[in-house]
Amino acid sequence: MIDRIAWLHVSDFHFRSRGDRFSETVACNALLADLTVRAQEHGPIAFVLVSGDIAYSGQPLEYERAAKFLSELSARISVATSRFFFIPGNHDVDRAPHRFAQIGARHVLTSQQAVDQALGDPVVMADLADRQRAYRAFVEGFASGQERTATPDGLGYVAKVQLEALTVAVAGMNSAWLCGGESEEKTLIIGERQVIAALEIVGEIDPQLVVAMAHHPLEWLTEWDQASCRSRLLEGAHFLHRGHLHTADVATSPQRKCVLVAAGSAHGSRFHPNSYNIVTVDLATGSSAVAEYRYNVEDGEFAAEPVIRTPCDLGGEIPGTGPELSAAIAASAPEASPFAGYMAALLLGEKEEIPLEIDGAIMFVTSSMAHDSDAEQAAPALAFLGLRNLLRIRREGVALGERVREHAEQVIEFAAWLEEKAEKDEQCRRRVSDVAAAQPAGEKAGGGLVAPHTALLLRELAAEEDWDALELQAGRALNSSDPALAQLGRRMIAMALMHSDEAPKRAHAAVLAQELIDELSVGEDEYLLAAGAFEVNNETARAVAATVDAVHRWPASARVVSYARDLATRTGDVPLRDAITKAREDYDNG
């Protein structure tokens, strides 16, 4: 059974068709030589991502040069050309034809609504798409036989990669369709409609792993497009790859599961610290590693940079009910029987906290907190939780009990680790003992939140106004299997970001707060949070609208009315004062 995968990420080749290509040849030969060795070290390489700027000016002859080099690369690392996935960059745009269409589009496409309409009209998009004609012809020829499903606008696509029982979706987002100017930072558009369409295709594939890419950093999008695309991509993908800036980087966020991976240029020049990445996902440990290899100009060779490691939790459901999984654990290792119900609840996401010895006391923390605070102590628990990924991989004809028995070693080690903690703390023993073994399917083991101690910690940090710590810890609750804890995490992280000194974080707080009040099950806390987030972003009209809505919904709430009056005083908003008065009168009159 597959337990690890690796893929190559390269970007920004800038192949030319004319002039002196000495620099290009030297840099690319060094890249080929190094990849031949690294692919064997990491192998097998499952697929290759090329995140844009394959050509220098989007000309057909430049792609002939690219095809020749990439074919050699394909042979060196033993990856079929149909497993090469591309997206275009700004250099893959032929800027000569339809120049005025691009200029006109920039003046018209000034809102998400306008972009939605354009992406829904093939006639409108035809001229803009035609500027990437040579790039598209190259991809169709080089990756012949590759099965891709294009988004309806024709810009992006999703491809399914089947690796034994593991299903991977590769989603390519076109961020270069509006390129054409010299200074384009904070002016580009992917289009939320393109992202929504791609993620719908991903949903139809139902993969365990989602790998997305776009050429430009999300920060280069216009503000309104960045806000919507960032939220959807970081929630919908495990990895988001990019290029463009010619500098490698790996970024993680406590707010999302997604790892952002930037490749340096494959060829900026032979005097540039060119680089590439190899990403490895270890399914058995639930972790990923991004290895960067950077060109040393002095000796003309690539060298390894420090590896960046992050958690990686696959999507999909674990088969079986709580009692069935508990029985399978007990059968695989009799010594685990006293803890089998608790262990099953952890795997199913019905519980999320594990015991950890901190300053001589046993405390229950989420696995992400344990990983950050003392990964060495928590190693047996983290190894056991890695079974979540392995059990999510669909394996037809293999019974649940057999699948658990394959990993009896992790079960035994975790059971011994739990016994050690239970011996030190009787309350810990009660919490991890088999009280939840008979819990019916669909109910949380032990009832209530899956991580009650984490919820308490978040509330304490908010009360202490420790906004940096709250941002970090709340982010770890966002992907909780418990909707109540996940919503608490979203509310708390919006609160933390709202108090940030950084304008982009405050803007993101407003986005999160709006998402919360768009839901049906939220209460006055979410509305007051949204009003505050809008206000600190100088969006007074939105703050007033959210407050008016809250007053109508909860006219008897002293907190709501008090906030509304304070806001009316700060803004001098007469309609808000009238709304408060009317809501109170309606309430008093029954």
Image (spheres, grey):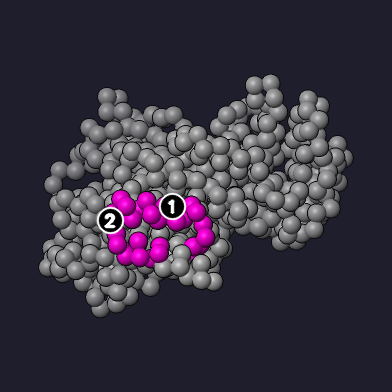
Q: Quadrant of residue 230?
A: bottom left
Task: Decide: few, some or many residues near mark 1? Use Cα within 10 Å; few <14, some 14-19, many ≥20.
Answer: few
Range drawn in magenta: 553-581
Q: Nearer the viewer, residue 11 or 197?
A: 197
**Residue 11 visible:** no
Residue that label 1 marks: 562
The spot of residue 345 in percent (x, y) is: 73, 48
Magenta residue check for 571: yes
Magenta residue check for 29: no
The spot of residue 50 in percent (x, y) is: 36, 51
Question: Which residue is pictured at 19% across the width and 68% down the height?
Answer: 108
Q: Nearer the viewer, residue 554 or 7?
A: 554
Which label sits on residue 99? none
* Cα separation between marks 2 and 1: 15 Å
Question: Which residue is pictured at 35% across the width and 62% down the height?
Answer: 576
Question: Which residue is pictured at 50% across the width and 67% down the height?
Answer: 587
Does the residue at mark 2 contact the one at mark 1 (Cβ under 8 Å)? Answer: no
Q: Quadrant of residue 158?
A: bottom left
Q: What's the residue type where badge 2 is placed? A: Gly
Which label sits on residue 572? 2
Q: What's the residue type where badge 1 is placed? A: Ser
Left or right of residue 78: residue 115: left
Secondary element at tag 2:
loop
The spot of residue 71 in percent (x, y) is: 37, 52
